[in-house]
Image: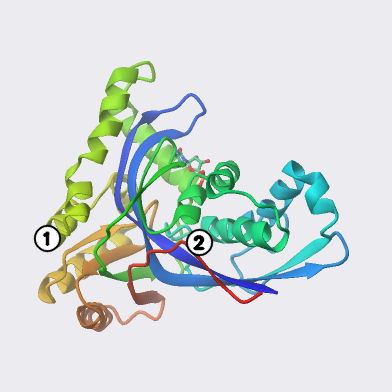
Amino acid sequence: MLTLFANAKINLYLEIIGSRSDGFHELVMVMQNVALADRIMLTPLSAPTIQLNCDHPQVPDDATNLAYKAVTLLQKYFPDRTNRQGGVEITLEKNIPVGAGLAGGSSNAAAVLFGLDVMWNLGLTRIELQALGAELGSDVPFCLAGGCAIATGRGEEVDTLPHTPKLHAVLAKYASISVSTPWAYKAYRQQFERTYLPLADTDNLAERKARVHSGKMVKAISSHDLATIGQELSNDLEKVVLPAHPKVTQLKAVMTAASQQHSGLGTMMSGSGPTVFSLCETAERAQAILRAVRDKISDPDLQLFAVPFSSHGIETKGM
Ligand code: C5P
């Protein structure tokens, strides 16, 4: 049996540049793993079946689950090598909130690709795993790379950033509010398509992509300029998700005030939301921010986590 831990991610930066010919959006993002992990156990089965166990009510335990799709993708590309391995039982313990903008589903798929490569002796490189992961979802290649990275294209082109400061994040999400990623991008397109860079404008596109590599956020990360990391937090999808969810707007205001009160660095929504996070320098400050938010909002529906940054997407234990 192989046990894997798949970490959540937050977006320190998410800029939507325009449409792509494949119908997706051209993005520039800075993504960061945090130490909030789902536990995934892979057990070999002698029969050639895929069995998925997950007791979370919002997570499908059938072929629509990205973790399940990761198995069938490997079987499709490597029929000779996977046929003689039999099947696999996947047991999924969810700790990352679902529909949260934290790449919970993508991280699970990344863990299954990574784990089966080991268990089935496929000998794939990280680049090969990332190319397979991109077929499952735009965030899967980042989840395989882990740590901190710039992601461009539709999110699948990942350049890792070597030196992230070891910050702490307070994550807040109402359990009963989830955001569909396709909805968020569709709503953004409806409202902001007029601002999109034209598809044919390849020079400007290249320039916009290059700009993120030398952008303020990336420089601040490389030089451990913590105040600037906090100031440069940015997410275009807030423009459509927050107006659609007044409770999340209010949560962000409470998080911002708590963060300012306890020397936090900044507050932003992650990905397509609705998780809101605040960054700070120490575990003690993270706990103080968490307590201040809990004091203001005593709603049992509000899930709060205080977690450090992680330099890993996937971690393994035992064989
Ligand atoms: O790649 P993933 O399956 O995570 O994307 C979910 C949905 O989010 C896509 O079907 C698309 O509607 C939207 N999306 C987008 N542009 C991206 C990434 C996602 O429009 N770069």
Q: Is residue 262 above or below residue 251?
A: below
Q: Nearer the viewer, residue 272 or 122?
A: 122
**Residue at (12%, 60%) from the top-left corner?**
227
Disc 2 on helix, strand or loop?
helix
Mark 1 sits near ligand 1, with its Cβ under 8 Å away: no
Q: What x and y, as percent, mark residue 100?
A: 44, 61
Per the model, the C-alpha gap separating discs 1 and 2 is: 28 Å
Residue under label 2, please give it: 104
**Residue occupying the far top of the picture:** 200
Q: What x and y, as percent, mark residue 191?
A: 33, 34
Q: Nearer the viewer, residue 317 or 155?
A: 317
Q: What x and y, as percent, mark residue 175?
A: 45, 70
* Quadrant location of the C terminus in the rendered image: bottom right
Q: Is residue 315 above or below residue 218?
A: below
**Residue at (15%, 61%) from the top-left corner?**
226
Quick check: can you spot residue 310?
yes
How many numbered marks have been drawn onto this rendered protein structure? 2
Disc 1 on helix, strand or loop?
helix
Quick check: can you spot residue 194?
no
Q: What x and y, as percent, mark residue 125?
A: 57, 48
N-terminal label among 1 and 2: 2
Q: Quadrant of residue 158?
A: top left
Q: At label 1, which amino acid type do we have?
A: Ala
Q: Say which of marks 1 and 2 sits in front.
A: 1
Mark 2 sits near ligand 1, with its Cβ under 8 Å away: no
**Residue at (21%, 77%) from the top-left corner?**
282
**Residue occupying the far right of the picture:** 47
Residue under label 1, please give it: 227
